Image (cartoon, rainbow, N blue to C red):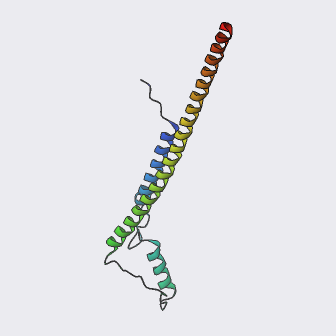
Amino acid sequence: MSFTVSRNTKINALLLLVVAALAVLPLALGLGDHKEEPFTGADAEAETAITELQPDYEPWFSPLYEPPSGEIESALFALQAALGAGVLAYYFGVRRGRRQGEARALANASETAKASETAVAAETAAGSGSAAVGDKDA
């Protein structure tokens, strides 16, 4: 039994491996071990750097909502990312569905046109045959 793998399957498997490597390598290599909170976001990193450079700096704006803990902040960020991914997936799904619908409509239209051409040709052939028969009787 031979099993062939399509090009798309190979590409998807490769992308999955790359994503897994991006998730696992920072942990395996110990990146961030020297930090108190190794995987904080860029906002926290920027705040720390600004505070070190200018301790008397005061932000121009304050957040509208400050989550009570980092875990809740991460959960809200994950929820935001999931909602965004859902909106994008919906958009691309609708776009693909429309494209497939248009392709089906064109295929049906061409089949209908071919069928009508065949019917017209058959009618023409039948009509000329009966006209010839009618001419012989006259």
Q: Residue 138 vs residue 95: left or right? A: right
Q: Residue 55 vs residue 119: left or right? A: left
Q: What quarter of the picture does the N terminus occupy?
A: top left
Q: Position of residue 114 (x, y in %)?
A: 59, 29
Q: Residue furthest front?
A: 138
Q: Pick whichever, 86 or 129, lies toward us.
A: 129
In the rendered image, the vertical position of residue 56 relative to residue 23, given as above or below: below
Which residue is rendered at x = 54% and y = 44% of the image?
102
Q: What quarter of the picture does the C terminus occupy?
A: top right
Q: Pick whichever, 23 or 92, lies toward us.
A: 92
Q: Position of residue 71 (x, y in %)?
A: 32, 71
Q: Residue 68 vs residue 129: left or right? A: left
Q: Position of residue 38 (x, y in %)?
A: 40, 69
Q: Pick whichever, 3 or 91, lies toward us.
A: 91
The image quarter containing residue 82 is: bottom left
In the rendered image, the vertical position of residue 16 relative to residue 68, given as above or below: above
Q: How many marks?
A: 0
Which residue is rendered at x = 63% and y = 22% of the image?
121
Q: Position of residue 86 (x, y in %)?
A: 42, 58
Q: Residue furthest top?
A: 136
Which residue is rendered at x = 40% and y = 63% of the image?
83
In the rendered image, the vertical position of residue 25 relative to residue 130, given as above or below: below
